[in-house]
Image: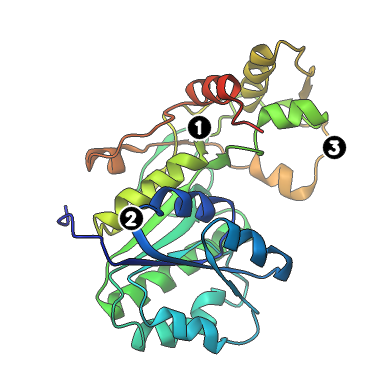
Amino acid sequence: MAQWREQSAMKIFLFGAGYSARAFARAIAPTAEFIGGTTRDGTKLAALTKEGITPFLFHGTHASQEIADALETITHLVISTSPAKTGDPVIALFGETIRRAMPKLQWIGYLSTVGVYGNHAGAWVDETTPCSPVSTRSVERVDAEHSWQALADARGVPLAILRLSGIYGPGRNAFVNLTNGTARRLNKTGQVFNRIHVDDIAGALQFLSMHHQGGIFNITDDEPAPPQDVVAYAAELMGVEPPEESDFESAQLTPMARSFYGENKRVSNKRIKSLGFTFRYPDYGTAFAAMWRDGSWR
């Protein structure tokens, strides 16, 4: 493992200061000298400032000089943006800046998805499993991973690719869906999903960035489970009746929602644990019990 380095001058930039990246910012704030982050929505600039993130508007059409100037002093770069059909938008606009004008850069983290593995009919996959993406968005993720690896190799800095399972946490979970009436219990025989609490994404980013660790890591829980069971457990904790199970095949779903059920696999997280990382919420039962107990599901 890479040596633990002195972090007093850790300066972080988040391309895509969304749900997961902001959780990382909260976790790393005591260690960081500076945290900057982008948004495409000008109405969110004030909220980022309130969270201790220096905000930058990502136009998507041109590389702003303001962002380029900020990158000059950055030591740690986190990418939490979606790729496009034309390639990764950050590389398209700031690839040359990252390649040639970030003298202090020490580490890059890229948030990807376990969707890159495709469908494995419920079998286990790990980081050595070849990518076989099914959906267009996962094909684009594979391309983006390759592009970031090429850029990191050209710069000679470690790149950590974090492949994330279904993300949940405060404001995004089955308790919220049960409360607002949108929870469903779709039953597709043999279907399982892994999940990951956003605090464990933040913890993994913190661990990997502070160790300057590169490689591919599945950031996922220990318990792939049928989605209808998760809703039922949340309802049990709330003391409410869960919605009736419905058959997946006859359910009315958007094409995107249906596509998620086209990928069935169990995802191993042994690689990052072998480095000494411990998940705060190793399964949805632990997480849901804690969220309900302390009210952090809201």
At a point 65% along the width and 79% down the height, the residue shown is 59
- Rounded to the nearest angstrom, the CA distance separating label 1 from label 3 is 23 Å
How far across and down, in percent of the image, does residue 41 sit? 70, 68
Between disc 2 and disc 1, the foreground one is: 2
Numbered tag placed on residue 122 in the rendering? 1
- Rounded to the nearest angstrom, the CA distance separating label 2 from label 1 is 40 Å
Between disc 1 and disc 3, the foreground one is: 3
Q: Which residue position is annotated with label 2?
A: 31
Contact (CB < 8 A) between labels 2 and 3? no
At a point 41% along the width and 54% down the height, the residue shown is 29
Residue type at mark 3: give it.
Gln
Secondary structure at badge 1 equals loop
Secondary structure at badge 2 equals loop
Q: Which residue position is annotated with label 3?
A: 252
Is the image coloured rainbow, by chain, by secondary structure, or in one colour?
rainbow
Left or right: residue 241 versus residue 34 is right
Q: Residues within 10 Å of mark 3 (few under 14, many from 20)?
A: few
